[in-house]
Amino acid sequence: MKRTIFAGFFNREQMLEELNYITKYLSTRGYEYCEILFGAGWGALYYPNDWLYEKVTFPEMFKKINTLEEELGSIGEDDFYIKIIDSTIEFLLCHEEDIHLSFDESSDITEHFYNHWKELGYSSEEWEVDENNKRRNLIRNN
């Protein structure tokens, strides 16, 4: 069953710090690209038709975010998805001021972020979730 770590709550500045941290960490792991999607909120204004993930470098991602924040939305107020390429791992910087880390199987990456958020003092819970990301079974929390 799919799992999601829910961590939060983050103000806007903290959310941007975490976005920077996520990309720096992934870069140290050899990732140069990710797939992004502008979700609820700004996605409705950004995508003309189908909402499709875009493959971008991390610098391109920040450039797109900065451009869209001038007109359409904002990190922390609108949903923003980051998928690790060739993986089931996906981050959602949620409009509800938390971060969701979804995956099929635990890995060193998912463990790193669970512990990172715990060490920073954020509430973190790992749940088994259904296909709609609805919480079904609590695995652990701090």
Image: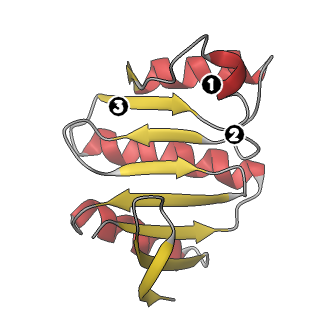
Residue drawn at point x = 44 percent, y = 59 percent: 101
In the rendered image, which residue does mark 2 sit on? 75
Residue 51 vs residue 91, the one in the foreground: 51
Alpha-carbon neighbours of circle 1 within 10 Å: few (<14), some, or many (≥20)?
Answer: some
95 over 41 or under it: above or below = below
In the rendered image, which residue does mark 3 sit on? 34
The answer to whether mark 3 and mark 2 are in CB contact below 8 A is no
Residue drawn at point x = 77 percent, y = 57 percent: 11
Residue drawn at point x = 75 percent, y = 34 percent: 74
Residue type at mark 2 is: Ile
Which element is circle 1 on?
helix
The answer to whether mark 2 and mark 1 are in CB contact below 8 A is yes
Q: Earlier in the sequence, mark 3 or mark 1?
A: 3
Which element is circle 2 on?
loop
Whole-angstrom CA distance, mark 3 to mark 1, is 14 Å
Which element is circle 3 on?
strand
In the rendered image, which residue does mark 1 sit on? 65
Whole-angstrom CA distance, mark 2 to mark 1, is 8 Å
In the displayed structure, does residue 130 sit left or right of residue 104? right
Q: Earlier in the sequence, mark 2 or mark 1?
A: 1
In the displayed structure, does residue 53 sit left or right of residue 6? left
Residue 19 in percent (x, y) is at: 54, 45
Residue 26 in percent (x, y) is at: 32, 44
